[in-house]
Amino acid sequence: MPVLREESEEKILVRFERLLQLSREIPKRAGSMPPLGFISRDVAQRGGFLKSPLSVTVDLTNQCNQDCLFCYRSGPVTLTPDGIPTHLPLESLDSICRQIVQMGVASIALSGGEPACHPQFIDAVRLVKQYDLALTVITNGTRLTEREVRTMGTLLEPERDHVELSVDAASRETFRKIARTDGFSSLQASLEWFQAYRIPFHTMTLILRDNLHEIDEILSMIGRHGPRECAVEAPFPKKGIPPETHASLDEIMDVHERLLQRASGTPEISLNFLHLSMNIPGGFEKLMSWTYGNDAPLSGCHGGEASCAIDIHGDMHLCQFLIDRGICRIGNIHETPMAALWKNLQEMKRSIRENVYGGRGGCPGFALEASCAGTGSACRRATSEPHSTGPTSTRPPASPSTWDSKVSPRNCSTRKGVRRPSGWRSPSVRPTGSMPPWRSCCGTNSS
């Protein structure tokens, strides 16, 4: 969580409220929730469920050519136990696309890892478009070749598809500090190719200690290449990010205020107040009440309500931010129909929302992780009450061969450098009877 350097929590909250007032005066610059959040809010408030997610994020690979300080993905799963990068087979991607089209899903995002590290990256893009799905490619841009960008230009539909490009530096030195690689020239080349081949793209920039002095320069650099939108936001308050990576909250709000007051023009700037609020004690509640009044949403998160994520093994999760933690895994699409998994995932989300933070909060998954406090108690609270009627059965404890206590939510302490044991794979223990299948997500005993 960003460090409170000079201002008290109370003063930070007062300043946040002033920012909200300013954002109301310039509404086009700031959003409190992404579009899917509005839909999931309405569904959750009515106590209902969607028959299918509106968007599915698919990990194309767990390999990445960068080692970014802020990355929400944990380092250990970038390699198999044998030290080999793992890619999603195209046959599995084809199965995913077929199932989500049958369910009525209209949008898919290819992520990772770095999707361009997949040896059949362009074939994967082409496969998705053969199913007539709206596509988002989430990339750092440093692994793309000009040939791949040119081909994407012929495959992507400007009205429906786009590339989401991470741009967190405007100089080689800053890029090296943040990404811990020397790929800045490759990023610059991708920006030029995007413009040359008319790639519809958005950018994402996180406000970090190392790039505070370059935010305006970053936006100017991006703006010269024709982006549709430049999103600027605070990082998720996740565990495992080095404290020195974070800017202070007052510094982050300095950036927000400056960008809100920036003269309109190109590129269009979008500020994510939801992510900022999650870093401020009491910020989420203030944001929701300020924005919606008595009609505030039950959650600021659309994972498990309007979206989900699928990893390289075919396991479905609440969202891509939590894949490596294993705490919100629901089951495998190769073993259980995706429609059934989606129904169970929505039940899981509802239980987390109700049992962990009483229906309020920013990200249920991170709230769950933080509440475990090394004991798994919140995990048990969130998963102890079955939602279906009829007899229940006791889930067998997780087998040591399928669960590594060093990285399980039992202690919620996943860190870079921790390696899975030999033969590791995501937990596969499943309950029996009428107990909701997602209760296996936490890897803790229910006693």
Image (cartoon, grey):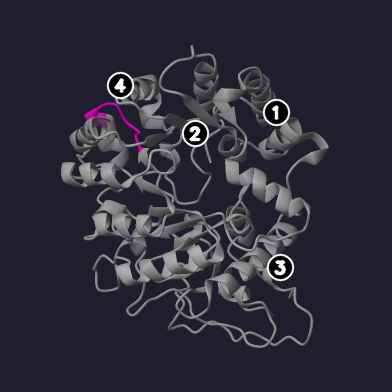
Residue matched to label 1:
10
Q: Are marks 3 and 4 in contact (CB under 8 Å)?
A: no
Kindly identify the amino acid type of the residue bearing the numbered disc 1. Glu
Q: Are marks 2 and 3 in contact (CB under 8 Å)?
A: no
In the rendered structure, which disc, 3 or 4, sits on the residue that comes first in sequence?
4
Q: Nearer the viewer, mark 2 or mark 3?
A: 2
**Residue at the spot x=57%, y=31% of the render?**
4
Residue 135 horizontal side relative to residue 430, left or right: left
Q: Does the stretch in magenta take in 12?
A: no
Q: Is residue 35 above or below residue 227?
A: below
Ranked by sequence position, the earlier of labels 4 and 2 is 4
- When the figure is inspected, residue 161 is found, relative to residue 351, above or below; the finding is above
Q: Residue furthest top?
A: 263
- Three-letter residue code for mark 3: Arg
- The alpha-carbon separation of the residues under discs 3 and 4 comes to 51 Å
* Residue identified by numbered label 2: 233
| Mark earlier in primary sequence (1, 3) | 1
Q: Which is more foreground, mark 1 or mark 4?
A: 4
**Range of residues picked out in magenta:** 166-173
- Using a 10 Å C-alpha cutoff, classify the residue at mark 1 as few (fewer than 14 neighbours), some (14 to 19) or many (20 or more): few
Neighbourhood count class around disc 3 (C-alpha, 10 Å): few under 14, some 14–19, many 20 upward: some
